[in-house]
Amino acid sequence: MIHGLLLAAGESKRLGQAKQLLQIQDKSLLEWAALALLQTCDEVSVVLGAEKKGCLSIVKNLQHEYENLHLIISSDYGEGMGSTLSEGLRKIGNHQHVLVHLVDMPYINGFHLKYLINHFQKNTSLALVSNYEGQNAPPVIIPQQLLSMFYDWRGEMGLGAFWKQHPDLVDRLELGVPYQDIDTIEDWEKIKEQF
């Protein structure tokens, strides 16, 4: 079983507006990421925090169609990604593997996630990190036996700290696309041109 965990709780301070609610082809980034996970994972949990009202209505609408979509409201989202990651993983529990995805990567679709899952199933003892032409980044699949390593993470501690501290516990898979995320208006304009 693979449980998808979508981190969508951030405050988007550098962007100056809620990245979760940005629209591409009449879908919010929150919808793009959630649907990619729903296409490929047995269960999906979305962690919300900032912009809760707008994001909540999107998740509730998706839940009408997808019974396997669950909602986690973060109480610690203001502390950073490390806090929302650990909160989400603790709520899911350690009885299944977890695929962690970020809300600001709309070019990562169900095809990429299925590719990761298929590779991970060949060796479920190692975490699997996406590689983008040499750069490691999410999505990441964390095996159930390693999940407890993240339970006490706090603040801005991102997933990169894990594969830097524990290279022996990590496998990497090249996705064949350049790495991009959305932190600034310039990033957003560049992403929009691809759709």
Image (tube, grey):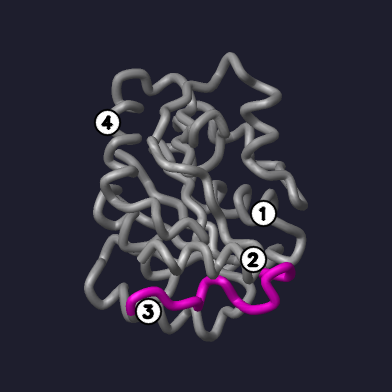
Q: Which residue is mark 2?
A: 10
Q: Position of residue 180 (x, y in %)?
A: 53, 51
Circles 4 and 1, Cβ within 8 Å, touching? The answer is no
CA gap, disc 3 to disc 4?
A: 30 Å
Magenta span of residues:
12-25
Q: Is residue 156 left or right of residue 54?
A: right
Q: Position of residue 47 (x, y in %)?
A: 53, 63
Task: Name the residue located 39 percent from the left edge and 64 percent from the top edge.
Answer: 70
Q: Check disc 2: other Cα within 10 Å, few if <14, some if 14-19, many if 20+.
A: many
Q: Position of residue 76 (x, y in %)?
A: 71, 63
Task: Name the residue located 58 percent from the left edge and 14 percent from the top edge.
Answer: 168
Q: Main secondary structure of the magenta part?
A: loop
Q: Is residue 21 magenta?
A: yes
Q: Which residue is mark 4?
A: 118
- Name the amino acid, label 1: Met
Front-most of 105 and 55? 105
| Secondary structure of the residue carrying numbered label 2 | loop
Circles 2 and 1, Cβ within 8 Å, touching? The answer is yes
- Name the amino acid, label 2: Gly
- Labels 3 and 4: the sequence-earlier one: 3
Q: Is residue 112 left or right of residue 99?
A: left
Q: Check disc 4: other Cα within 10 Å, few if <14, some if 14-19, many if 20+.
A: few
- Labels 2 and 1: the sequence-earlier one: 2
Q: Check disc 3: other Cα within 10 Å, few if <14, some if 14-19, many if 20+.
A: some
CA gap, disc 4 to disc 1?
A: 27 Å
Label of residue 81 in the image: 1
How many numbered badges does the structure rendering display?
4
